[in-house]
Each structure stands twice: as structure tokens, then as C-alpha cells.
Amino acid sequence: MAASDNLVSIKGLYKSFNNSIARLDILKGIDFDLKAGEALSVVGPSGIGKSTFLHILGTLDRPDRGSILYRGEDVLLFDDRKLAKFRNEFIGFVFQFHHLLPEFSALENAMMPALIKGMTKKNATELAEAILIRVGLKERLLHRVVKLSGGEQQRVALARALVLKPVILLADEPTGNLDKKNSQQVHDLLLELNQELSMTLVVVTHNMELASYMSRCVTVVDGLLVETSFR
């Protein structure tokens, strides 16, 4: 780690999109630091730029300009191959729509990032089994995901995101399709894992109850991030 204890430092981040009528400026010069181990919620109205920010933070998309330093190194200077390798090893993702492979089992889905990294099937299986058990799916390892409930499917997606023990987990509306009971269980699990794994957590959410559980909250306002307090 560099002299600063920041895990991520973002400087001058801009992003716009063009539609048939005009250019839409979504992010307008964000400067932002995220410390290792923080649990951060990102809130704001629909269409304001929350997911755009998360996708750029996760290097799934590139900004128009700006820098994203992970532990002092600007990952936007990486070529696509190096960036994909960094993303696979360093960042975990959970989305509202879990994007699981329905014809495969919970175990096979959770193994995917490890296999992509080049691990042996044996080692990938061991890692996937361990994290699936941790998220409460010990009895569901070999079930095809189409046979699982919505809450169980999201737990498989969470296990897949965590199988390589990423330094940072990015979650985009992770409980958006779940009922209140399952939402609460996933909320609790995210915060437990944040503590257990010393993992930095960033959650985009409309759920203000979930947002209030985080150690820090920011609201997207006119293309910038504004610190928000629930107290």
C-alpha cells in the first residue's frame, strides 16, 4: 500500500453519453477517495449516474477522462488484456440480475472466476465449495440454479463474486429483485463479509435502510458525489 491508506483514488472523472438529441453529461469531474475496508453506499434517483459510476470504478467501462488509482496505480493506463486480468483478480461484482448460467449447478457457477484465472478444477472446486457454504448454501451445491429460489440465486452470485477473495466487492442493487426477508439476509451477509474478509464494499442501492447500515454514504448530485449522513 502506498503512503496513503486509500485503496482507490479517483481524480477528475467525467463521463457522458450521446443520444439522438443531445449529449448527456452524467459524471462531471468526480474526485473521490475510498479507504481499504470501508463499506460505502451510493444513492440517488434512477438515471442519475450511480451505475455508471460503479461500472467505471469496476473498470467495466472507461470514462471520457480522469484517473482511477488502485493502490497508487492508474488502472486506466492498462491495455484491455491487463485490465481484464486485474478485474478478475482484484474486483468482485454482484448485480441486481445475477447473470448466472442456468444450465449449471451452484458449484459450477461459483467456480467460474477461478477457472478463468487458470486454476485447476480441484482448486477451483475447493474455493467455490468453501464460499458457498459460508453464504449458507451447503445443501445446494449441486443444484442447478434454475431450481433455486431468488434469494439462493443471489447468494450463488455473491459466492461467485467472492471466490477469488477480491479486495473490493461492487454490488449494483443486489437486493432489487428480492422480497423483504431475503433482502435483509443479503444485507446482513454483505456486512458480515465486509468485516470477516476485511473487504472493501461499495453498494449502489435505492434501499435507504441498506444504505444506512454502511459506514459511509454518498449521493450522486449533478454528476458529483456528495457525502451524506443518516445521523
Image (cartoon, rainbow, N blue to C red):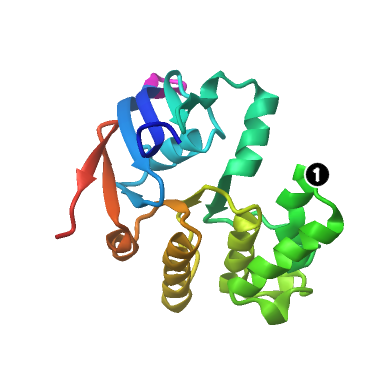
The quadrant holding residue 222 is top left
Q: Is residue 13 above or below residue 170?
A: above
Image position, residue 201 (x, y; %):
43, 52
Total of numbered circles in the picture? 1
Q: Is residue 57 magenta?
A: no
Q: Is residue 2 above or below residue 54?
A: above
Picture residue at 43% right of the left edge, 22% below the top: 67
Residue 48 in view here = no
Residue topped by disc 1 = 118
Q: Residues within 10 Å of mark 1 (few under 14, many from 20)?
A: few
Residue reaching furthest front?
Answer: 3
The quadrant holding residue 195 is bottom left
Query: Is residue 228 left or right of 55 when viewed as pictured?
Result: left
Image position, residue 78 (x, y; %):
60, 22
Image position, residue 15 (x, y; %):
41, 24
Q: Quadrant of the N terminus?
A: top left
Picture residue at 71% right of the left edge, 62% below the top: 127
Image position, residue 198 (x, y; %):
46, 56
Q: Quadrant of the C terminus?
A: bottom left
Residue reaching furthest bottom?
Answer: 139
Residue reaching furthest right?
Answer: 121
Residue reaching furthest left?
Answer: 231
Query: Is residue 35 left or right of 62 when viewed as pictured?
Result: left
Picture residue at 65% right of the left edge, 54% below the top: 99
Q: Which residues are magenta?
A: 15-23
Picture residue at 61% right of the left edge, 38% below the top: 87
Element under label 1?
A: loop
Given the image, on which type of amino acid does mark 1 rest?
Gly
Of 155 and 198, nearer the camera is 198
Query: Is residue 71 left or right of 150 when viewed as pictured?
Result: left
Of 164 and 21, nearer the camera is 164
Q: Is residue 73 above or below residue 189?
A: above
